C-alpha cells in the first residue's frame, strides 16, 4: 500500500473513494428524482443530519454492540485456540473433533440464532454467546490446521534436538500457527459485528441491531439508516484493521 | 489400519457421538422444551404432509441464492476485470467492494425492498456477498500470471486484450472457483435474511414463523434444512473447485 | 567440550510397510558400519538406496526392524534426549520467525540450558555470518542458510554430527565453496561425522572414509579410505589421484549388480 507522496490530497482521496462517492451521489439523486417520502427512503444528507443531531442515541447503541462483538471475538478465539491446542496433544481428540467442527463452521449462522435464543433466553448475554459460537468454529479449524503446518523438516529437527512435547508446542507449533490465526481473526472480526447486529435485530435486546429494528418499525427511517451507516463504518474499519494485523503477523511469522 | 482410514473412522465417530448426545439431551429434557430429541425432528422431516411445505421453502431459497450467485458473480467478475485493465481504478474499487460488503445484511433488506421488489430482495442481498468474495478472489487470481508468462506474450506480440483473454483470465479461473465455494455460506445467509423483509416463502420465512409461533420442532427442522442445503452445495462447489484447479491450475 | 562418540551400526535392517504388499519394502539389509570417534565418513549411493534411512536410524527418527544402532554405546533416542545430537538436513529447517542468532540459540532453549552467547558468537563468526546475526532466514541466500543450519548443529558441542545432503539444494559453485567452508569448520572440533551425499567430489574432499551403498535393499558395496592429508586444499580436487578415486567410486555407484567384497583405495 504505497502512497505517492507529493500528490495533492484531493486527488488521492478521489482515487481511493470514487466508488463510495459515486454510490452516495447515486443514492442522493435516486431519492430526489423519485421524490421518495423520507419514511420510505431518506437521502444520505438527511441520514447524516440525524447522526449529527442525535449522537448520544447512536453512541449508546454502538457501545453495547461493539462491547459484545469485541468480548465475543476475544472469548471465541481464545476458546477455539485453546481447544485446538488441547486437541493437538491427542491424535484421537483431533480425529474426533475436526470433521465435526468443520461441519459446524459451514452451518448458516442466522439459522442457529433463533434456536440459541430459545435455549438461552432473549437478552444481551445470548448475543454474546452467539458471537462466541460464531468466532469459535473458524478459530478452532484454522488453529488446528496451523498447529500442524510447521516449516518442512522442523519437526524432525526438534525430535533430534530432544525437545519435550511442551517445547514443541511453545517454540514450533504455536508460532507456526500464527498466520492461520491471523486469517481466522480477519474472518471473525467482520462476522462478529454483523452477527451481533442480526442477533439483536431478531431478539429485540439492545444495541445497533435493536435500534435499527425499533426505528424502522417506528418509521424513523433516517435513524434506522443512521444505525446501518454506523455499523457499516465500524465493520469496514474492523476489516481494515484485521487486514493490517494479518499483514504484520505474516511478516513476523513467515 | 492406515492413518487415513483411522482418521475417517474417528471423524465419523465424532459426528455420531454428537448426534447421540443431541438425542439424549432431547430425551432427558436437559435443554428444556427448546431442545427436542433428534428423532422428533427427523420424524417431522420425514412427515409426508409437511414435505410439500419443506420442499417449497427449500426450492424458493435455493432459487434466490442461485440468482444471487449469477448477479454477484457477474458484478464481481466485471468490477475485478475493469480494475485489472484500468489500474488507476484499483484502489477505489477495493474500497467500494469492502464498504458494500460491510453494510449489515439486515440494512440491505429495506433498501432492496424499495429499489427492486419484494421477491427480488433475497437474491439481491445474497448477490452482495457473492459479489465481494468473487471480486476479491478474481482480483487476486488475475494477478497469478507470472512475469515469465507476461514476457512470453509480449514477445509473441499479443495486445492487452489478447493477453487478458488467453493468459490472465484462464489463470484466474481456479481462484474464481475457490471464490464461488467460499461465497456459498454467506450467499445462503444473505438469502435467508433477505426473505425476512417481505418474501412470501423460503427457509428464512419458515424460521421466522416457527420462531414467532413457538413451533419448536418445526424451527429445528427448518434449521436442519438450511444446514443440509448448506453442506450439500458446499460439497458440490468443492468438487467444482478441484476440477478447476486440475484443469487450469 | 564433550568427547566425540563412536557410531555403531550392527547388521541394521529396515523394512517399510507398503499398501497392497504383505512384505513391504526392504530399505536396508543387514548393514554394518562403525564410525570411530572423530572420524568423518561420507556415505555415497544412488537415489533410493536407503542412505537417508540409515541417517534417520542414527538420528533417532526411526527404529531399525532388525539389528541395532548405537551412539557411544547408547541408543540414539537416549542421546537425542540428552541433546547431544547435531543434525543438518537438506531442508535447512530454520524457523522463519526467528533471527539467525535466535535460530542458532534454539538448541540451548530446547535443552533448557542457559544460552551461551559467547559460543554462539564464535560459531556465527566461524561460519562467516557475523554481519547477518539479526537477519531473518528469508533474507539470506541458500548457502548462507545452510551455514546457519550447520552452526546450529554444532552449538551444543554434540557427540556426533549428522549431515543429510546439506548442500543438495545449492548450485555447483556454491556447493564447492561450502565444501571448503565445511572442512574448515569441521577441523576446529573434528566431531564424529556422518555425511550423506550423492556427490563423489564432495565425499572424497571432506571424508576420512567413503562408503558406497547399493540400490534397494541398501547394503555396503565398497569402502575407500581417503589417502589425502588434512588440511586439504581445493587444489587436491585437481590431482590425478583424486580423479582416479572419483572414477573408481563412480563406477562402484553405477554397477547394477553389487560386488560385495570391500576393497581399499
Image: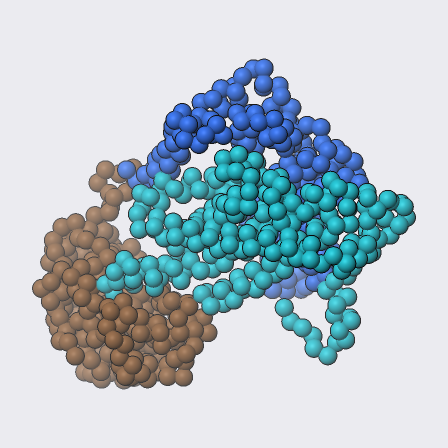
Question: Percent from the top left, x then y, of residue B154?
Answer: 68, 63
Q: Residue at x 46, y 65 (%)?
A: A254
Question: What color does chain B have in the rendering?
Answer: blue
Q: Check the image and tell me how it is coloured.
A: by chain
Chain for colour cyan: A
Question: Percent from the top left, x then y, of residue B33?
Answer: 48, 27
Residue B119 vertical placement versus B71 (above, below): above
Total tally of numbered discs in the picture: 0
Q: Nearer the viewer, residue B35 or B196?
A: B35
Question: Percent from the top left, x then y, of residue B241?
Answer: 55, 43
Q: Residue at x 47, y 22 (%)?
A: B40
User: Position of C156 compared to B74: left or right?
Assistant: left
Q: Nearer the viewer, residue C5 or A66?
A: A66
User: Position of A64 compared to A34: left or right?
Assistant: left
Q: Nearer the viewer, residue B87 or B75?
A: B75
Query: Is residue C172 in sight in this rendering?
Result: no
Question: What color does chain C have in the rendering?
Answer: brown
Residue A170 vertical placement versus C183 (above, below): above
Q: Nearer the viewer, residue B137 or A36?
A: A36
User: Position of A24 compared to B2: left or right?
Assistant: right
Amino acid at each position: 500500500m504505497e502512497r505517492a507522496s507529493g500528490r495533492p490530497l484531493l486527488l488521492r482521496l478521489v482515487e481511493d473513494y470514487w466508488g463510495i462517492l459515486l454510490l452516495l451521489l447515486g443514492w442522493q439523486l435516486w431519492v430526489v428524482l423519485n421524490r421518495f417520502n423520507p419514511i420510505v427512503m431518506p437521502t444520505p444528507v438527511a441520514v447524516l443530519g440525524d447522526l449529527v443531531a442525535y449522537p448520544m442515541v447512536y453512541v449508546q447503541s454502538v457501545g453495547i454492540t461493539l462491547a459484545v462483538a469485541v468480548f465475543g471475538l476475544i472469548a471465541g478465539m481464545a476458546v477455539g485456540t485453546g481447544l485446538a491446542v488441547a486437541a493437538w496433544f491427542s491424535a484421537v481428540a483431533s480425529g474426533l473433533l475436526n470433521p465435526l467442527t468443520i461441519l459446524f463452521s459451514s452451518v448458516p449462522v442466522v439459522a442457529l440464532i433463533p434456536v440459541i435464543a430459545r435455549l438461552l433466553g432473549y437478552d444481551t448475554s445470548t448475543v454474546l454467546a452467539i458471537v462466541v459460537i460464531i468466532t469459535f468454529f473458524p478459530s478452532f479449524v484454522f488453529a488446528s490446521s496451523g498447529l500442524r503446518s510447521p516449516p518442512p523438516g522442523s519437526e524432525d529437527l526438534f525430535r533430534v534436538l530432544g525437545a519435550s512435547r511442551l517445547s514443541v508446542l511453545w517454540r514450533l507449533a504455536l508460532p507456526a500457527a500464527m498466520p492461520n490465526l491471523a486469517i481466522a481473526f480477519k474472518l471473525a472480526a467482520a462476522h462478529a459485528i454483523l452477527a451481533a447486529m442480526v442477533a439483536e435485530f431478531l431478539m429485540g435486546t439492545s444495541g445497533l441491531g435493536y435500534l435499527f429494528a425499533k426505528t424502522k418499525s417506528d418509521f424513523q427511517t433516517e435513524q434506522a439508516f443512521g444505525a446501518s451507516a454506523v455499523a457499516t463504518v465500524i465493520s469496514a474499519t474492523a476489516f481494515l484493521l484485521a487486514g493490517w494485523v494479518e499483514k504484520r503477523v505474516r511478516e513476523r511469522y513467515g | 489400519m492406515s492413518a487415513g482410514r483411522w482418521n475417517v473412522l474417528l471423524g465419523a465417530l465424532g459426528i455420531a457421538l454428537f448426534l447421540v448426545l443431541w438425542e439424549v439431551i432431547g430425551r432427558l429434557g436437559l435443554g428444556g422444551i427448546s431442545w427436542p430429541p433428534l428423532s422428533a425432528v427427523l420424524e417431522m422431516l420425514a412427515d409426508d404432509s409437511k414435505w410439500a411445505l419443506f420442499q417449497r421453502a427449500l426450492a424458493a431459497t435455493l432459487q434466490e441464492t442461485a440468482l444471487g450467485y449469477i448477479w454477484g458473480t457477474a458484478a464481481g467478475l466485471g468490477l475485478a476485470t475493469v480494475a485489472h485493465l484500468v489500474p488507476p481504478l484499483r484502489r477505489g474499487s477495493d474500497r467500494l467492494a469492502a464498504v458494500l460488503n460491510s453494510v449489515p445484511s439486515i440494512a440491505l433488506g429495506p433498501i432492496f425492498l424499495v429499489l427492486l421488489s419484494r421477491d427480488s430482495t433475497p437474491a439481491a442481498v445474497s448477490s452482495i456477498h457473492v459479489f465481494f468474495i468473487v471480486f476479491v478472489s478474481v482480483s487476486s487470481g488475475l494477478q497469478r500470471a507470472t512475469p515469465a508468462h507476461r514476457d512470453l506474450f509480449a514477445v509473441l506480440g499479443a495486445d492487452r486484450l489478447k493477453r487478458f483473454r488467453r493468459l490472465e483470465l484462464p489463470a484466474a479461473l481456479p481462484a474464481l472457483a475457490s471464490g464461488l465455494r467460499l461465497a456459498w455460506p454467506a450467499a445462503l445467509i444473505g438469502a435467508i435474511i433477505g426473505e425476512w423483509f417481505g418474501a412470501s416463502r423460503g427457509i428464512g420465512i419458515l424460521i421466522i414463523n416457527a420462531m414467532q409461533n413457538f413451533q419448536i420442532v418445526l424451527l429445528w427442522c427448518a434449521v436442519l434444512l438450511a444446514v443440509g442445503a448448506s453442506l450439500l452445495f458446499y460439497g458440490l462447489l468443492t468438487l467444482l473447485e478441484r476440477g478447476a484447479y486440475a484443469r487450469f491450475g | 567440550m564433550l568427547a566425540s562418540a563412536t557410531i555403531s551400526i550392527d547388521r541394521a535392517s529396515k523394512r517399510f510397510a507398503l499398501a497392497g504388499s504383505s512384505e513391504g519394502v526392504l530399505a536396508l539389509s543387514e548393514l554394518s558400519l562403525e564410525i570411530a570417534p572423530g572420524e568423518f565418513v561420507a556415505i555415497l549411493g544412488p537415489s533410493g538406496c536407503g542412505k537417508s534411512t540409515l541417517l534417520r536410524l542414527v538420528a533417532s527418527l526411526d527404529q531399525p526392524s532388525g539389528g541395532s544402532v548405537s551412539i557411544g554405546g547408547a541408543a540414539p533416542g537416549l542421546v537425542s534426549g540428552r541433546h547431544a545430537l547435531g543434525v543438518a538436513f537438506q531442508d535447512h529447517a530454520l524457523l522463519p520467525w526467528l533471527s539467525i542468532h535466535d535460530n542458532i540459540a534454539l538448541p540451548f532453549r530446547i535443552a533448557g540450558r542457559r544460552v551461551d552467547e559467547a559460543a554462539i558468537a564464535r560459531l556465527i563468526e566461524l561460519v562467516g555470518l557475523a554481519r547477518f546475526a539479526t537477519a531473518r532466514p528469508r533474507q539470506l541466500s541458500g548457502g548462507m542458510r545452510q551455514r546457519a543450519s550447520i552452526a546450529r548443529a554444532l552449538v551444543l558441542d554434540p557427540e556426533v554430527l549428522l549431515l543429510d545432503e546439506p548442500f543438495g539444494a545449492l548450485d555447483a559453485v556454491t556447493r564447492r565453496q561450502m565444501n571448503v567452508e565445511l572442512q574448515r569448520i569441521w577441523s576446529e572440533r573434528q566431531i564424529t561425522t556422518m555425511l550423506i551425499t550423492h556427490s563423489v567430489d564432495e565425499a572424497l574432499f571432506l571424508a576420512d572414509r567413503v562408503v558406497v551403498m547399493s540400490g534397494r535393499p541398501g547394503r555396503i558395496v565398497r569402502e575407500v579410505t581417503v589417502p589425502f592429508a588434512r588440511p586439504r586444499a581445493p587444489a587436491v580436487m585437481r590431482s590425478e589421484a583424486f580423479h582416479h578415486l572419483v572414477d573408481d567410486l563412480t563406477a562402484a555407484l553405477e554397477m547394477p549388480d553389487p560386488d560385495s567384497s570391500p576393497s581399499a583405495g
